[in-house]
Amino acid sequence: MANSSAPGSGRRKSSSSPTLADVAAHAGVSPATVSRVLAGNYPVSRSANQRVQRSIRELNYSANTHARALAGVQTKTIAFILADVRGQSFADAAHGVEQEASRRGWLSLIGTTQGDSERELALVRLMREQRAGAVILIGGVTNEAVDYRAKMTDLARSLHSAGSLLVLCGRPPLGDDVPSAVIEYDNEQGAYAMTSHLLSQGHRRTLFIAGPERQSTSMQRLAGHRRALHDFGVPDAPELVEHGVFTRASGYQLTKNRLAAGQDFTAVFAATDVVAAGVYAAAAEFDLRVPEDLSVVGYDDVELAQDLRPRLTSVHVPYEELGRAAANIALDSQHQQPNWTGAHRLFTTHVVVRNSVTRRD
Amino acid sequence: MANSSAPGSGRRKSSSSPTLADVAAHAGVSPATVSRVLAGNYPVSRSANQRVQRSIRELNYSANTHARALAGVQTKTIAFILADVRGQSFADAAHGVEQEASRRGWLSLIGTTQGDSERELALVRLMREQRAGAVILIGGVTNEAVDYRAKMTDLARSLHSAGSLLVLCGRPPLGDDVPSAVIEYDNEQGAYAMTSHLLSQGHRRTLFIAGPERQSTSMQRLAGHRRALHDFGVPDAPELVEHGVFTRASGYQLTKNRLAAGQDFTAVFAATDVVAAGVYAAAAEFDLRVPEDLSVVGYDDVELAQDLRPRLTSVHVPYEELGRAAANIALDSQHQQPNWTGAHRLFTTHVVVRNSVTRRD
DNA sequence: CTTCGTGTAGAAAACGTTAACTATGCTGCC
DNA sequence: GGCAGCATAGTTAACGTTTTCTACACGAAG
């Protein structure tokens, strides 16, 4: 009764969770014992163990992750950052990461950038402050911020020196001396193959609907397209390249504009399947049949490609596998040497031929 | 020189991040001053400020979120849990949450359950341990775990008493006395409206492809369908209800089986647009034209509905808005009274008529 | 009957912040 | 000239864990 804080008089923290100390008091043991029961890495007598277990249940105790992290326990949190969850390809990759992470008992933090590179940098910083075990960047870079590259390099180093790792998934490496892992798939090669396919079918004038001008994925696919044109001896036609964003609406609008302007092309290469869906919609509006009047191809080979009519010829990218690979590299890096230099893995892509292209002479 | 740890001799933590104390030492000030520079809530002299800023930059310091959280600073982390990121409707809702959260400066944690209710419980527990400001559950419940309801109720209470909040988005409430917020949309009503539409077009025999038997969304939609049949005086035909999962493959397989068995129906009501895509695929395989030979309708009205040919008649659900609403309620609850009882909001749905249904007599 | 393990328990020092106190020069005023 | 008031700065006690390190019985062995 000499205790200064009389029960019920002035409970100072009414709505806060019970702490380990509360459990200890309730069970009549020391905090250390409770911690040991929880961790199970030290002998505790049967009776003490039972009392603690009971107290935990009765008080509805749950350990404070932050305190635990501070005391030096690995948090097992992996972060991934992408432009937008709604994109099917991103979602597939995200699923791969999440799947693999949770299989290995890790928690996933997610952040989205809407393609803003400033926001991307801010998110990586935030994840570093969260002491995430790894940070995975999914999807192409939109290289707008002035110091983007330098800043991201700094962050990669900073993460690495804190025992974490930056994983670039589906985007170009930062440089040889930057400690980060890279999981890529071949955008240039895939586009090259696809354009070759179109050319072999006799299409000499193909409208290429790219993504944003400064977006790596977009530029790589465009580069592959151009290289194929060049190799087949087709002159470069700048008026046959259009830049937009990776959405259905963008594909629709751009195609519509071109068709309205009466420009002459026999095929459209959309930088993405959803963009191709927009192309279909625009073609339908002008009473053009695909592929008889207009051939259309896409990139990504998401489920949608099979639901479009005619079914869309596209470049297959193993997004989910990409995500899984990224997660695995990230998680394996936990046991990495401090002077580790970086992993690099390149996935291949291939053309899936369906019914959206016809021969043209 | 009397100092026991000679510099450079045995740096005990070579690869760890610099701490606030390191910055303080580097700048020649006390830790408190550094903290104050960071927080900016206390006067600091110009010179000290500048030195600290410089040290932070030079050491590449980043504050430890865990220590900060432990010291009582709100972490501003919101968690959301869904079955699978790949589902377009979930992704839309998730996007709504993420968008609103980041707009208000919050970080999002994401977890996926693959429809496993045990895993869902485990994730909510985990998020509670992370001291998330709110936990949003998106999508229907699959009520399999024995004590699911009781356990989730406990968790809701536990979260609430820790100043957090459980938000149920697109799933039924747990009970009146459970402190949680509920954001629903009317599955039953939407299905009722859609079946009424089919009936008004003369379809008396409609195959209903539901989701899992114990899944709330699935059951609500089925209930609406049944009520409409009843109200129109169409006898209940159990053989016209099929249970699967919410995927394209499931819709395809089930429809194919039914068509192969030669069963007689003039329309298919798929519980989800992606399931409807599978129905389309199966119909095509049997050379059935939609809608001339078979009418098909879906639910969710995701982008895909417009890309299917013929365009799919579906029930529109404002998923993104749902997500935004959930996030807002969750974030507003931060300033809630302790004896707060719960919010409830119901979004309405409506039929979007396209070209996948024809009149039948 | 001392002495040494062995099994179990507690005390206390981290971990990296924040915030409530103190402490110290100043400035200006009576 | 002493002192209130102010602008800064530093000290230190939390926050809730984990993890040494120490302590204490209790048998067994010498």
Image (cartoon, coloured by chain):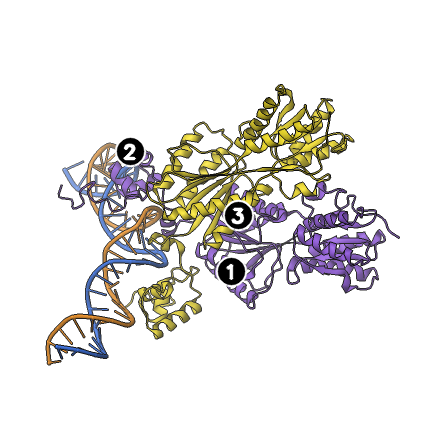
Chain colours: A purple, B yellow, C blue, D orange
Question: Which residue is identified by label 3?
Answer: B96
Which chain is mark 2 on?
A: A
Which chain is mark 3 on?
A: B
Which of the 4 image quarters holds residue B287? top right
CA distance for labels 1 and 3: 41 Å
Question: Which residue is identified by label 1?
Answer: A339
Query: Amino acid under label 3?
Result: Gly
**Number of residues whose C-alpha sits closer than 10 Å to that of mark 2, classed few (under 14), some (14–19) or many (20 or more):** some
- Along the line of sight, the residue nearer the viewer: A12 or B69: A12
**Number of residues whose C-alpha sits closer than 10 Å to that of mark 3, classed few (under 14), some (14–19) or many (20 or more):** many
Q: Is residue B7 above or below residue B124?
A: below
Query: Amino acid under label 1?
Result: Asn
Q: Residue at x 69, y 29 (%)?
A: B201
Where residue B86 appears, as percent x and y from the top left, is: 59, 42
Question: Which residue is identified by label 2?
Answer: A51
- Along the line of sight, the residue nearer the viewer: B355 or A80: B355
Q: Quadrant of the N terminus of chain A?
A: top left
Q: Secondary structure at mark 3?
A: helix
Q: Residue at x 75, y 42 (%)?
A: A309
- Along the line of sight, the residue nearer the viewer: B43 or B12: B43
Q: Is residue A107 visible?
A: no
Q: Secondary structure at mark 2?
A: helix
Asked if badge 3 and badge 2 are on a common chain, one would say no
CA distance for labels 1 and 2: 47 Å
Pointers 3 and 2 in contact (C-beta within 8 Å): no
Asked if badge 1 and badge 3 are on a common chain, one would say no
CA distance for labels 3 and 2: 45 Å
Which chain is mark 1 on?
A: A
Query: Amino acid under label 2?
Result: Arg
**Marks 1, 2: nearer the viewer:** 2
